[in-house]
Amino acid sequence: MAQKNTQKNNSPSIKTNLVSKINPVLSFKEKFFAYAELMRLGNCVMAAIAVLIGFYLIESADYKSAAVAAISTFLICGAGQAINDYFDSKIDEKTSRNRPIPSGRITRERALTFSMVSFFAGLVLAFLINQATMLVAIIFSILLIAYPMFMNKVKYLGNIVVALGTAITFAYGAAAAGNITPLVVTLSMSAFFSNMAREVTKDIEDVRKDKGTKVTLPMVTKNSKHFVLAYYVLAISVSIIAYTSFNLSGYYLAFTLLGSAAFLYALLLLYNGIPKKSQKVSKIGMLVSLVAFVFAKIK
């Protein structure tokens, strides 16, 4: 009887410990970093910068619209990342336990609330600019929600959404300036192809981790490396076409060639069976290409 009473008295303590482990009491700093990780803060900052570059290429003086568009993109990007983690939480429990939701730092309900509030705020800001930004924001908000709901398990389709979402940021910035020019469209195409190459490379790297949870291009075909090759060739070719077609600066060409060299090195690493390093080098190439876009019109 005494032993039974002891177990009964200890059970609340055990339950409390389990709850505190699942929902730890976090400081403000810990909460900030948890939400920053949930929304992938670095990705959102880069998306906002891409919007500003797209705006800059139009040479508009409406800096207020540029700022609003950048903030709108930042919020919608963060919302998309958060809702992706919301739907992927069960998968992350097995493959990425340190993510904010499976680690217990953020609950699924709060992640969903954060996502919906961010989507709403981003869309409201898009409405305040013009009809073009409003339309783009609505379409991509729908895609960012549909991606984890319906396309994430068929990841080779989701790759298109992710790459298109990155590329469209330049056009979104141009739309905020009121004019999506052929130059912006061309540079957006180059960004799309390089992002597709990196997305497929990441899938090659994660093929074992994704097995049983997602269907990726490497699972569908043994020629996925050739797709990466094709995407890099298209990205480099479109960048060079932009230089010759729009009389861009020598600085643009120099950084484009440097970024292209990074892409080719990433491709070499991939074919040598080192996809993890390949996708990291690819990211460097994309950042260098982003600098090339900045210098496109600086003579």
Image: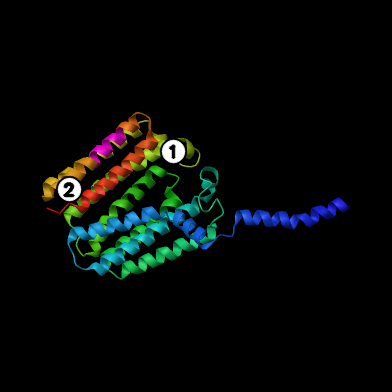
Judged from this view, the residue extending furthest toward the bottom is 128
The answer to whether residue 169 is magenta is no
The mark found on residue 197 in the picture is: none
Do labels 1 and 2 touch, CB within 8 Å? no
First to last magenta residue range: 259-267
The amino acid on which the numbered mark 2 sits, given as a three-letter code, is: Tyr
Crowding near pointer 1: few (<14 within 10 Å), some, many (20+)? some
Q: Residue at x 50, y 39 (%)?
A: 212
Query: As rendered, which of 296 and 84 lies closer to the eye?
Result: 296
State the image coordinates of residue 291 (x, y, percent, origin top left). 24, 50
Q: Quickly name the residue at label 2.
A: 252
Q: Is residue 204 above or below residue 35?
A: above
The quadrant holding residue 137 is bottom left
Residue at the image point whose x is 23% and y is 57% from the top: 54
Residue 298 versus residue 222 in the image, above or below: below
Using the image, determine if residue 170 lies above or below residue 278: below
Q: Position of residue 29 (x, y in %)?
A: 49, 60
> What type of secondary structure mainly makes up the magenta span?
helix
